[in-house]
Amino acid sequence: MLAIFNKGLVNPPQELYSPASLCSSRKPKLPEEIVKDFVSSNPSNAFTMSFGDSALLACISQGNSYPRQQRLFCGLDGIYCIFLGSLNNLCSLNKQYGLSKGANEAMLIIEAYRTLRDRGPYPAHKVLQDMDGRFGFVVYDSKAGQVFAALGANEGAELFWGIAGDGSVVISDNLEVIKGSCAKSFAPFPLACMFHSEQGLMSFEHPSSKMKALPRIDSEGTMCGANFKVDVHSRIGSMPRVGSEANWALGGSRA
């Protein structure tokens, strides 16, 4: 899967960018080139969805193959989700959110996101803590202009993110896609974490703790985009759950 978001829409951690990208023999690519290369790898099974200059989503369908983990795509009322992996408690969560038994994980994520966005009773970290399985997802709300991404606590699903040549944020489950697209400005998306386009990166297992960036050196000895870890000795300041809808991602996280 592939998701690209304009730098005006998403403000990633500054540490994700590496100045070494400017000096690397392999330069970061522009979004158009990234998508072209992604689709060309499997043109018969690839599809893309563009949202003007703001965002682009792409995925390669499973076809008749049996991939290591399932990839699902769903769109509803201007909200789009690419989901990787599976949830062990999907049935109970579907019941909790009032969905039919046949609803898949991508449908569930959209409904959970809508509940959060529309001022639901639970903070985002609690919603993610309730999900049991190996999963990762990216949500794009085209009406609100918001991005919500997360990676579960269990190893098995992977996401990587980086910075394209024009400053756009690139997210994919394919490490080679990220390496080829972002040069030295990329890193693994941290486990048990979520990213919201306005509230930034945070741990959903430790929502009251700040995230810290750790220097990451590649096999060539070059500084790359940082690894992000929970700083258990820090605390996030109190943020009351009032005001604009942009506060929902931190709702309930108080020091």
Image (tube, rainbow, N blue to C red):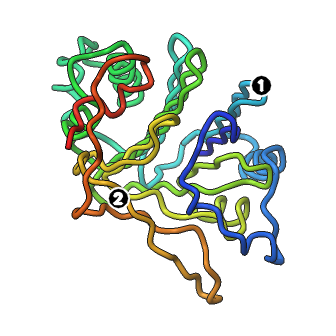
Foreground residue among 67 and 78:
78
Q: Quadrant of residue 149?
A: top left
Which residue is drawn at the image coordinates 82% and 67% (left, top)? 27
Q: Report whether 88 appears left or right of 163.
A: left
Which residue is drawn at the image coordinates 26% and 53% (left, top)? 209
Q: Residues within 10 Å of mark 2 (few under 14, many from 20)?
A: some
- Residue 156's label in the rendered image is 2
Which quarter of the rendered picture does the C terminus lie within?
top left
Q: Position of residue 188 (x, y in %)?
A: 49, 62
Which quarter of the rendered picture does the N terminus lie within?
top right
Q: Which residue is mark 1?
A: 52
- Residue 22's label in the rendered image is none
Q: Is the residue under label 1 in contact with that under label 2 (CB below 8 Å)?
A: no
Q: Position of residue 220 (x, y in %)?
A: 65, 88
Secondary element under disc 2, as helix, strand or loop, is loop
Question: Is 4 drawn above or below residue 92 in the view shown?
Answer: below
Q: Position of residue 67 (x, y in %)?
A: 47, 52
Which residue is drawn at the image coordinates 28% and 14% (left, top)? 99
Foreground residue among 166 and 4:
166
Q: Quadrant of residue 219?
A: bottom right
Secondary element under disc 1, as helix, strand or loop, is loop
Q: Residues within 10 Å of mark 1 (few under 14, many from 20)?
A: few
Which residue is drawn at the image coordinates 77% and 25% (left, top)? 52
Instruction: Calculate the distance from the C-alpha at mark 2 to the C-alpha at mark 1.
Output: 33 Å
Q: Give the residue furthest to the front.
A: 237
Q: Amino acid at mark 2?
A: Gly
Q: Earlier in the sequence, mark 2 or mark 1?
A: 1
